[in-house]
Amino acid sequence: MEQSVPEAQLTEEDLALFYEVANSIHAVRDLDEMLQNILQKIKTVFRVEGASLALHDADLSEFYFIRTVEEEQNGDHDRKKKMRFPDHLGVAGWVLREKKPAIIPDVAKDDRFFKGIDIQQDFHTRSMICLPLLTRRRLVGILYVLNKLDGEFTARDSKLLEILSGTIAIAVENAQLYGEMKQYASSLEQENLRLKSEVQS
């Protein structure tokens, strides 16, 4: 059951809020700290029970969580490594195919919702906005914003999160590229040491 999202007009206050959150993202360089900061800001600003972020592994056709509601609540940093699921399942699979947000007031009434994620997280999802994290190159992951505390998710919530998701996507991709560059530099350094050792021998 597809839920359409009506257009929302953003006020100056909304845009100021967006810039505040966006600036907090750029102020942090460490990926894990940055994501923790992002999700905490989202929980506070949008008055939701939690938020989660799953990256897309195109080679394995899977999503895997790198920051979850459960981790935020319990400080559980190990279980996230086990939390992978096929990228065609659930709301995430729909968002991956459609490349647009899904706003779901009641997951019990939406066929796209995959209950297996809740089982993995020990978290009961009631409502959500699920957004693609898109860059110019690809979809890097999915952002879940879960369980509105007051009322239902609005078109304003979806619009603000959609704008914010672009900033998050670029920040995540930059962090991934930086990690790949560091790994490449490290391998070059090791190869250089090996060659020096061979020459000396």
Image (cartoon, grey):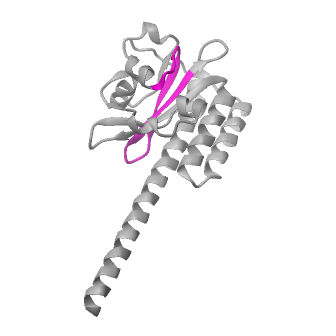
Rendered location of residue 142, percent (x, y): 44, 34
Towards the viewer: 78 or 152: 78
Towards the viewer: 153 or 73: 73
User: Is residue 179 visible to the viewer in this orientation of the structure?
Assistant: yes
Going 30% across and 86% down the picture, which residue do you hit? 197
User: Is residue 114 visible to the viewer in this orientation of the structure?
Assistant: no
- In the picture, which quadrant includes the N terminus? top left
Towards the viewer: 27 or 120: 120
Rendered location of residue 161, percent (x, y): 57, 31
- Position of residue 96 relative to residue 188, above or below, is above
Residue furthest right as drawn: 13
Provide the residue span drawn in magenta. 121-146
Rendered location of residue 137, percent (x, y): 37, 48
Going 41% across and 11% down the picture, which residue do you hit? 110
Going 54% across and 29% down the picture, which residue do you hit? 69
| 90 in the magenta segment | no
State the image quarter where residue 15 is shown.
Answer: top right
- Position of residue 13 relative to residue 152, above or below, is below
Going 45% across and 8% down the picture, which residue do you hit? 108
